[in-house]
Amino acid sequence: MEDSITKISDTKNIKEIYLAGGCFWGIEAYAKKIYGVTETTAGYANGKTEDTNYRELQSTDHAETVHIKYDAEKLSLKKLLKFYFQVIDPTSINKQGNDRGRQYRTGIYYTDSKDLETILQEIAEQQKKYPDKIQVEVEPLKNFIPAEEYHQDYLDKNPGGYCHINLNAVNTFLIDPDEYMKPDDSELKSRLSSLQYNVTQNKYTEHPFENEYWDNEEKGIYVDITTGEPLFLSTNKYNSGCGWPSFTKPIQKDVVNYAEDTSLSRIRTEVLSRSGNAHLGHVFPDGPIDKGGLRYCINSAALRFIPLKDMEKENYGYLIPLLEKELGKNSNTLNK
């Protein structure tokens, strides 16, 4: 009985969607790299018949499709669809990459009617990027048939096999600003300390060498104190000697914005968080040359540090692979 209860508890947040995006070898391999995806199956969907196989696709009109199961606690459908749109040409009809034919059409097939609103909203958002109409088929799932065994996990079995998409694109979109909305001012005042509020909202500067993170060397990430949006990796932090946390770059270039600051009768470049529009500090062109030459001088009071060991429970588990990859790079550099 205990095993049964555990199994139900473990799977209660598992949802599913079916995505067609050209050759399913690449789409499946890509989907497996997305944090929160729990299971994938290559198959054929939304054709005319209840049965088909690879050789009969032209006559049965099924689309090469990947059945994706995902943990909704870790990955939203909206974010999963953003990953999907990163690697397809949504305006093409019956072609993706070098492949041509109806079996290579794009499609989003759903089993839960509640998902339709999210799907249509994301397509409307994506449409803003294209002058031509998006041609992605959106339908309730019908006639899904798992593909032959040799198609399953094809690129795992054949690492040099054909793939029409860039599998590393999964690393170019990580942080969705819609997941980190700014609270209203009254909530900020109640949640933040006086120093945190004044730094982030009134552009104060805390004292050097007397702040929480200037000498922190623990592995983890730094997030916006106002919204929780990830801003910096510990691997990009270094001791600049200035007395404030210093970083060579943000975790992703678009998580920060910039503004001209003339408050000290000289021009400086202010750094603000994207979602919270919180004052973070300034960026200067005197950083390590081999790391890009920039120094992001950031107030500790504008940050919250999440240790690596706590990232999963704090819902930043999707960034663990990135952090571990960067930690590996640093280790290799030190060992040279």
Image: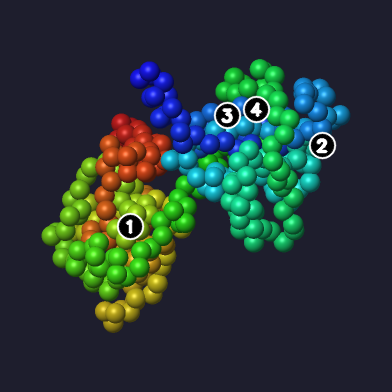
Q: Position of residue 330 (x, y in %)?
A: 33, 38
Q: Quadrant of the N terminus?
A: top left
SS under mark 4: strand
* Kind of element beneath mark 3: strand
Q: Quadrant of residue 57?
A: top right
At x 15%, y 65%, the residue is 207
Picture coordinates of residue 184 (x, y %)? 35, 68
Residue farthest to the right? 59
| Residue type at the position of mark 4 | Ala
Q: Would you say residue 272 is visible in this rendering?
A: no
Task: Residue under label 4, please give it.
Answer: 42
Question: In the visual, does 95 lie left or right of 165?
Answer: right
- Which residue is disc 1 drawn over? 224
Q: Which mark is residue 197?
A: none
Looking at the image, which is closer to me, 91 or 49?
49
Inter-mark Cα distance, 4 to 1: 39 Å
Q: Earlier in the sequence, mark 4 or mark 2?
A: 4
Where residue 203 appears, as percent x and y from the top left, is 28, 72
- The outermost residue toward the bottom is 265
- Pointer 1: residues within 10 angstroms few (<14), some, or many (20+)? many
Question: Front-most of 311 and 112?
Answer: 112
Secondary structure under tag 2 reads: loop
Mark closest to the chain's N terminus, 1 or 2: 2
Eye-nearest disc, 4 or 2: 4
Label 3 sits on residue: 40
Q: Are marks 1 and 3 in contact (CB under 8 Å)?
A: no
Q: Residues within 10 Å of mark 3 (few under 14, many from 20)?
A: many
Which residue is disc 2 drawn over?
Answer: 101
Direction front: furthest residue: 1
Give the mark nearest the N terminus, 3 or 2.
3
Distance Cα–Cα, label 3 vs label 2: 23 Å
Residue 219 in the image: above or below residue 256: above
